[in-house]
Amino acid sequence: MKAVSVTPRIIILGIAVVLESLAVLSVAEHLELAPLGTFYPNLISVAVFLLPSLVGLLSQRLTVALLLAALPFWALAVVYLVVARPLWDIDLFSIGALAQRAAGVSVLLLTLGLAGWLLRRVIPGLKATV
């Protein structure tokens, strides 16, 4: 009986992580992934802030909430560094600026995932573990 109630949550969690990945990719690469015209930038801006919180809300464990909230950005950063801009071609001062921006986005996504998980702890009937 428990597996039946857990499965939809895990499916929705997976969909939220994929949507967050697409939103982060769209913002980082300035891609318009859906033909929504002038409404698209507003929608993606809201998605980048709401989806990590939704991921945190759907995760029962804190570590899973934090990992899945930041994973799309970290994966994008690794792919970007390997494919588009290896660190070998960047001078030392540029590496510091790049790391500073990456750390800022990572902290933002981790904080939003934490906020969603904390909201899960406040809502009665939802189980949250550390």
Image: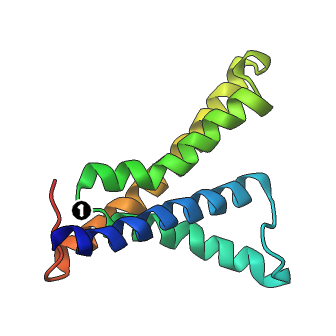
Q: Is residue 71 visible?
A: yes
Determine the image quadrant of residue 57. Answer: bottom left
Seen in the image, is 82 located left or right of residue 103? Answer: right
Determine the image quadrant of residue 122. Answer: bottom left
Seen in the image, is 129 located left or right of residue 22? Answer: left
Residue sitting at x 62%, y 28%:
96
Q: Up-down: is 124 above or below 30?
A: below
Residue sitting at x 38%, y 48%:
67
Residue sitting at x 28%, y 48%:
63
Q: Mark 1 is on which residue type? A: Gln
Residue 77's spot in the image, x, y percent?
62, 39
Seen in the image, is 83 located left or right of residue 45? Answer: right
Circle 1 residues within 10 Å: few <14, some 14–19, many ≥20: some
Coloration of the structure image: rainbow
Q: Is residue 116 visible?
A: no
The residue beneath circle 1 is 60
Q: Up-down: is 25 above or below 1?
A: above
Residue 42's spot in the image, x, y percent?
70, 79
Residue 62's spot in the image, x, y percent?
25, 54
